[in-house]
Image: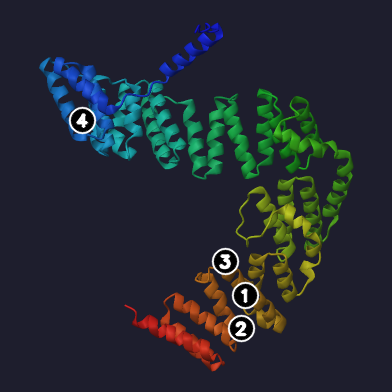
Amino acid sequence: MRVPPLHPACILLLLSQACCLAAEEPAPDPAFVAELSDRRLLVDAFDSDAWESLVRSRTALEDYVRAREALQIWRRNMAKKDLRIAKIDQLEAALEDAQGNHLAAINARLRFLQTEPKNLQIWTDLFFKTPRLREATEAAEAAAKMLSSSQFSDVWNAVVEGCIKWGDPQRAGEALELWRQGLLKFRATSPKLERLQGDVDWAEGRQREAVQSWNKSLSGDAKNGSLLDKLLVAHEAMGSVSEGLDVATRLLKLGETAPNYCRRANLYILKREWKDARADVLKANAIEATSDSTKRLYPIFEGFDSWYPNLKSLEDQVRKARGPEAKAVALLERTKFFVNLGFYLAAYEDAAEASKTNPSSVVASLWLGACANQTGRTLASPAVEGNAETLLKRDEALRDLDGLSLPQKFQRLLDLGQREVARAFSRKSPGNDEAVGGAGRGASMGLLESEMKMYESAGRTTDVRFGKALQRLVELEPDRADLWISLGNYQLAQGQLDEALESAAKAETKGAGEPAQLLIKAVAERRILP
């Protein structure tokens, strides 16, 4: 049968696949490399390439004894020819690192540098792989003598950037200090030093110090876009609106992009400069209507003429409000307006001011917590459930909340699902049950019972907080036998046998016959267990 010839395109395809397969050859097996190197050394015991392959492969196989033996033989063979091979010390350092012998690895690299004192990679490895940089202080001083100021900075730059990348800012800070000390000996500076100092400060939470360092770096590198971007992120996080606007404007001078116009627009929003914000959003839309930031802001500002008059009216109300309560109410009305528009940071600022103006307002606390959740802020106040959008849907339940009596306030908060806030207000002043009478006592009980049910439904009846709620309930209702039984069972689970027995006895006096006896029996059985 005659086979038709292959089409030229098929031949090309087969050839390209063959080339790809050849290019993707797997790395040789270390055991095979070791065996091949041994054979080569039987022919030529002075073959340094074969010795290197042998040491590397045996190190990879974790055959450290034979790897060290190969290094020693290689070194002796070279000594017979009065040769010093620096590569031997480099491979010995890698071998010591693999075994965790860091001090020996440092010494091996120092020996290598006696032969090749300007090898930047070895200097970098020396410092980067040293567990405690303080141990390498003498080596740092030697590096300052061996290298030029530029080479010295290149080494430390790699070490500092590596430490930051791998999440070790403390070690990066130590490297920066050694770098500074070395540059003093050169009477030189490095433009990267302050930038990296800012990175380290930011990673360790020293925001203001980071900004100062980045600004110093910018003084010698005013058009560094990535550095300006870091500064803008910092000012956004710190709430430094005016400084952020300045940086955003500098970034836009380097390149007008839609995201950067939108970032500046967000800062104008926080500064309540609405027309400037609108102008930036329109520019962003003209440059790139499909960018995520443009798609979020442009629809809002497209309807600017419809909502801006209402905002002006709310701003007048805030300005004219007299007294803390009235001002907080006006601020919270503007908070809700901002949430409706999607200006969550502006809403957060208004909620924070309202809470500060009227600290006794539960509604202000709820809005502050919800806006914090929406914007990713953290607060020390009681945790609020949900974000600003979800709270806006429950606005009707918030309207008269501050005017309710304490018991009614507790119940409303529970109805809203704000358990933590309710707990905080129930414990706001000691003895508040007595202050508000039986209704307040009932509200506290409702809160505690609700809390107990939450832990029971989650199967967490051994949680310490469950036990505290039980203890508080029996203090409020000492005549309820069922509560004493529940408390006794909790104490039994915690191994508090004497307390469990006492709770069982209390329950028995309150009429809990069989359950109390069962609890007493369980305590007795637990006592005789090994």
Gap in Å between the C-alphas at discs 2 and 1? 10 Å
- Are dots 3 and 2 in contact, CB under 8 Å? no
Residue that carries the numbered disc 4 in the rendered image: 67
Q: Residues within 10 Å of mark 1 (few under 14, many from 20)?
A: many
Report the quarter where the C terminus lies: bottom left
Q: Earlier in the sequence, mark 1 or mark 4?
A: 4
Q: Is residue 332 above or below residue 442?
A: above
Please, what secondary structure does the residue beneath circle 3 have? loop
Instruction: Name the foreground residue: 291 vs 365.
Output: 291
Q: Residues within 10 Å of mark 3 (few under 14, many from 20)?
A: few
Counting from the top left corner in percent of width and height, residue 383 is at 63, 60
Q: Earlier in the sequence, mark 1 or mark 3?
A: 1
Residue that carries the numbered disc 3 in the rendered image: 458
> Can I make out residue 80 in this image?
yes
Gap in Å between the C-alphas at discs 3 and 4? 57 Å
Numbered disc in front, either 3 or 2: 3
What is the three-letter code of the residue carrying label 3? Ala
Numbered disc in front, either 3 or 4: 3
Residue at 50 percent of width and 41 percent of height: 203
